[in-house]
């Protein structure tokens, strides 16, 4: 009998994506979150109060850390994040994100 492959659990997928976010942190620190966070709100990945939590931080690094912490609690953020990065001229970072998902 052939074994049926199992899909990864939600917890495993979240852990994998959280690890990828941490790997992408340096590249994201070079971006301005105010360029792509509104797109994530428009795509229903983030809520407006989460956007405010990101914007309330003083430095860009703190904003990226807050964004990463929020995204670690979400399920389907990779596609919208990739789209938001590309639309805001951050194709290099989007490419890194896509490559990390493989």
Image (cartoon, rainbow, N blue to C red):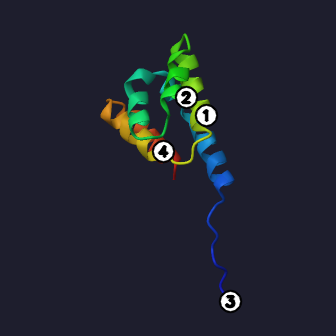
Location of residue 93 by image quarter = top left
Vertical comparison of 53 with 79: above or below: above
Vertical comparison of 12 with 52: above or below: below
First along the sequence among labels 2 and 4: 2
Quick one: SS at disc 4? helix
Q: Do the residues under discs 2 and 1 have CB atoms within 8 angstroms?
A: no
Q: Do the residues under discs 3 and 1 have CB atoms within 8 angstroms?
A: no
Distance, label 2 to label 1, CA atoms, is 11 Å
Location of residue 91 by image quarter = top left
Quick one: SS at disc 2? helix
Vertical comparison of 7 with 59: above or below: below
Quick one: SS at disc 3? loop
The residue tagged 4 is 78
Residue 71 x, y percent position in the rendering:
56, 37
The residue tagged 2 is 67
Residue 70 x, y percent position in the rendering:
59, 33
The quadrant of the image that shows the N terminus is bottom right
Residue 31 visible in rendering: no
Question: Between 57 and 59, which is closer to the camera in this rendering?
Answer: 57
């Amino acid at each position: 009998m052939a074994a049926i492959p199992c899909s990864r659990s939600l917890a495993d997928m979240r852990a994998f994506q959280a690890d990828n976010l941490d790997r992408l942190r340096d590249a994201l620190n070079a971006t301005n979150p105010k360029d792509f966070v509104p797109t994530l709100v428009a795509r229903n990945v983030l809520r407006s109060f989460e956007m405010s939590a990101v914007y309330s931080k003083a430095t860009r690094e703190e904003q990226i850390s807050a964004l990463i912490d929020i995204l670690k609690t979400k399920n389907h953020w990779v596609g919208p994040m990739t789209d938001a990065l590309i639309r805001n001229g951050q194709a290099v970072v989007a490419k890194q994100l896509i490559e990390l998902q493989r």
